[in-house]
Amino acid sequence: MSDTSFRPFDTLLDEGRALRILREATAGAEDGELFLERRRSEALSFDDGRIRSASYDASEGFGLRAVRGETAGYAHSTEISERALLRAAETARLAVGAGGGRLALPPAATNRRLYEDADPTAGIPFARRVETLREIDAYARALDRRVVQVTATLSASLQEVEILRPEGTRIADVRPMARLNVSVIVEENGRREQGGSGGGGRHGIERLIDPAHWQAEVAEALRIALVNLGAEAAPAGVMDVVLGPGWPGVLLHEAVGHGLEGDFNRKGTSAFAGLMGTRVAAPGVTVVDDGTLEGRRGSITIDDEGTPSGRTVLIEDGILVGYLQDRQNARLMGVRPTGNGRRESFAHIPMPRMTNTVMLSGRDDPAAILAGLEDGIYAVGFGGGQVDITNGKFVFSCTEAYRVKGGRVGAAIKGATLIGDGPTALRRIRAIGSDMALDPGIGSCGKAGQWVPVGVGQPTLLIGGLTVGGSAA
């Protein structure tokens, strides 16, 4: 929310004095801001029949930035006072040098609200949260005698930010987050396997502790664990792969999304640098980054520079048409900011980051895509992955996958990894399902040591010629 009369929290700073210090720090700069933040978070974990941990954390601080050209001076402090602000201004001022810059125009205002600003734990007694986790444990064990361990974690946070700019603009946002995770371990004949499920978003925990919700999460975690219990060793070799809808979009996020962030392209280090306006994917492939999806984990009303979030088309029908931009990189590249300037906290400088990165639906029937797979694997769930931004090469581990032969989905496989590179994988997409889905709200993205919540999504996809790493002879 952009509202000059709204302050998310009070500080000991005099606003007029703080503005004068900020203006002195950014005199002759091209951009800059004072970023104030207060964050509260709670987490409750229940493991093997008892409370394993209960935590509450609170932090607050500020970051002050001055930007000129490619240089940014940044200083931060957990002490929100005029004295600390003066020290930070001296440091940030070093980036301005002799000055001569012209201050960029402020971000556009917005009164759009994508989520409520209430504390996500408000009105939910601690005892009720504990009892819900106990019920999850008991319910999971009652579903199947092979369940030997249950872990459930309920967490919530509230981040309050205010941005003060040199021209006097004040922008504020209050960002809730809640999440429930359930993990189940099953054992049979000496073999143990694990399955997990969960998610959340920018809302309260009420919906997460509703029995209809958590019972479905427990059932899904158990289903995955039992699938893995009967899984065979994964094959190895080059083969066609069908990716399921929703969370498998994390492969798109890592292998493609990072390469479309503005800073990597401005510096020429991305595999997609210099390819604007050219074909980088198969026809029919359209990828967007959308921070405006209501209540989603990766959504933000404004980014951490004050720019309203947006829906940015990155690839349209296979053609590269856009990059994700913060204010600095947009200015240096001669384009508009896209509302993707994000930071982990007041202790971090903003940079171009994804929000909710999604491949849109195509026209192919998902069942027909699977039926047309002669020899390959069907990957439904993913764990960790790695990508090299300079060439797009990725390695991803599958948490749920199946062998497919003659269009028939066969045995589950265990230990499969997908190996390839983003640009090549995009061009080898042969079918795009009509079933685009978003992930359940579990994504976190790391870049340059900073972590921010994100979302992903995609339809069922057929990609030809991926390398599958496995352990089968």
Image (cartoon, grey):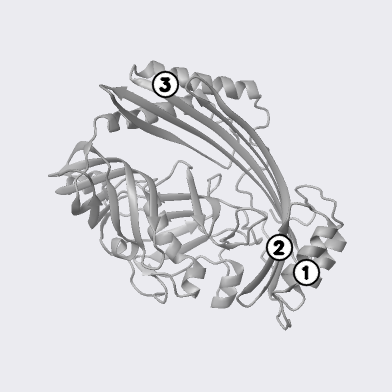
- Callout count: 3
Q: Earlier in the sequence, mark 3 or mark 2?
A: 2
Q: Can you give x and y, in whole percent of width and height, for residue 422 in the image? A: 34, 62
Q: Residues within 10 Å of mark 1 (few under 14, many from 20)?
A: some
Residue placed under numbered mark 1 in the picture = 90
Frontmost residue, 214 versus 382: 382
Q: Residue at x 24, y 34 (%)?
A: 231
Q: Earlier in the sequence, mark 1 or mark 2?
A: 2
Residue placed under numbered mark 3 in the picture = 140
Asked if the residue at tag 2 contacts the one at tag 1, i.e. Cβ–Cβ closer than 8 Å, the answer is yes
Q: CA distance from mark 1 to mark 3?
A: 57 Å
**Circle 1: element type:** helix
Q: Quadrant of residue 20?
A: bottom right
Q: Residues within 10 Å of mark 2 (few under 14, many from 20)?
A: many
Asked if the residue at tag 3 contacts the one at tag 1, i.e. Cβ–Cβ closer than 8 Å, the answer is no
Residue placed under numbered mark 2 in the picture = 75
Vertical relation: 441 (above or below) 304? above
- Depth check, mark 1 against mark 3: the one in front is 1
Amino acid type for the residue under numbered disc 1: Glu
Q: Can you give x and y, in whole percent of width and height, for residue 98 in the image? A: 73, 83
Q: Earlier in the sequence, mark 1 or mark 3?
A: 1
Q: Residue at x 60, y 71 (%)?
A: 328
Q: Can you give x and y, in whole percent of width and height, for residue 66 in the image? A: 70, 70
Q: Residue at x 63, y 40 (%)?
A: 157
Q: Residue at x 70, y 81 (%)?
A: 101
Amino acid type for the residue under numbered disc 2: Ala
Q: CA distance from mark 3 to mark 2?
A: 48 Å
- Depth check, mark 3 against mark 2: the one in front is 2
Frontmost residue, 159 versus 118: 159
Tell me the number on the disc at residue 135: none
